[in-house]
Image (cartoon, rainbow, N blue to C red):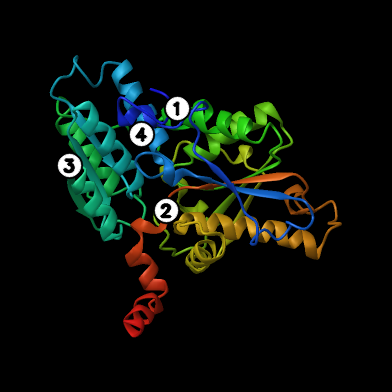
Amino acid sequence: MDHAARVYNSVLDMLPSEENPSPMVRINKLNPLHAQGFQLFAKLEWLNPFGSVKDRAAWEMIRDLEERQQLGSAKPNRGIVEPTSGNTGLSLAAIAAVRGYPMRAVVPSKVPAEKRMLLKLMGADLDVTSDAMCPLPGAEDGTIGLARTYAKASPDRYAMPNQYENQANVRAHIRTTGPEIWRQTAGKITHLFTSLGTCGTVTGLSQFLKSKNPAIKVIAVQPSPGHDVPGIRNVSELDVSRLYDPKLIDEVIEVPFDRAYDRVLDLCRIEGLMAGPSSGLIFEGAHQVLSRSLANPTAPSNVPASSQAPTGLGVMIFCDSVLKYASSMLKHHPELVSNAENEA
């Protein structure tokens, strides 16, 4: 492979690494502290080969299964089963296809139709359950329960990576995302903004970045309860994750979930970034943190450090693009179709 010439022998060679990082783009017009010299960047994870930040965890988990001889020549007929709200399943299905493994994805019914279609397009068998937007623990007929049933009932047929408990999910970000950000910012990062899902991203990034500089502020943005933002969770929904460590997070900020969809429009129309709803939510959280420092530049000592007037450089993890969420966008902004029809 030749990263400089962008010539590869396999699509898997395109997976991100410190030598081949996903790009970072500066936010200009929408950065509330632009005039104060604070730099805000978006790390565009939709430019990974299979379209999201989950490429990293999926590849790390499959490599781990192969290294432990749970997949591959030692288990020639074995494939993968995984509960997923979409992106991890898409990444696993794509990598499994290249490696020659069958894939079964178990998804909640509220997952956008676009993602379910893409899973089928990548060759995955699909089971749809009446679960929440993101898979929840508990009932055997729920997304996680059904995937576990497949893995237990047919151990010779299925390995379940289990993104919610697998430390390979965390290691992916210690091995790739963290070093990429450190190198791309020349070690100048002062604030990291991300979301909560499986929590592999926030945990791995916090571990790596704080090992480099303990003063870096890690801020997790969560949607308000009852949200319909695919792939991310409110803290109240984190019972499913064994990777969440609140000690690694300096602040959790809650954002009304409908603002995620409003911010998608802003990012597309003002910055030219085709960010998905989770990215819109993360941007809104970052914007609130930075904006409140303008209103209160000398915050009292009892205000979290991340609330005080920040200086330096912030990085937001933009997990995926809006292209997989047309139906979700139309739910929140039906004028996108009505305007188009009027123009036609």
Side of 306 relative to 70 (left or right): right
Side of 98 relative to 34 (left or right): left
Side of 128 relative to 59 (left or right): left
Side of 267 relative to 242 (left or right): right
Label ID, residue 3: 1
Residue at x 15%, y 33% (from the top left corner): 153
Q: CA distance from mark 1 to mark 4?
A: 21 Å
Looking at the rendered structure, the kind of residue marked 3 is Gly
Residue beneath disc 2: 321
Q: CA distance from mark 2 to mark 3?
A: 21 Å
Q: Where in the figure is residue 208, as x and y percent of width and height?
A: 60, 29
Residue beneath disc 4: 58
Q: Earlier in the sequence, mark 3 or mark 4?
A: 4
Residue beneath disc 3: 123
Q: Is residue 239 above or below residue 269?
A: above
Image quarter where the N terminus lies is top left
Q: Where in the figure is residue 184, as x and y percent of width and height?
A: 61, 34
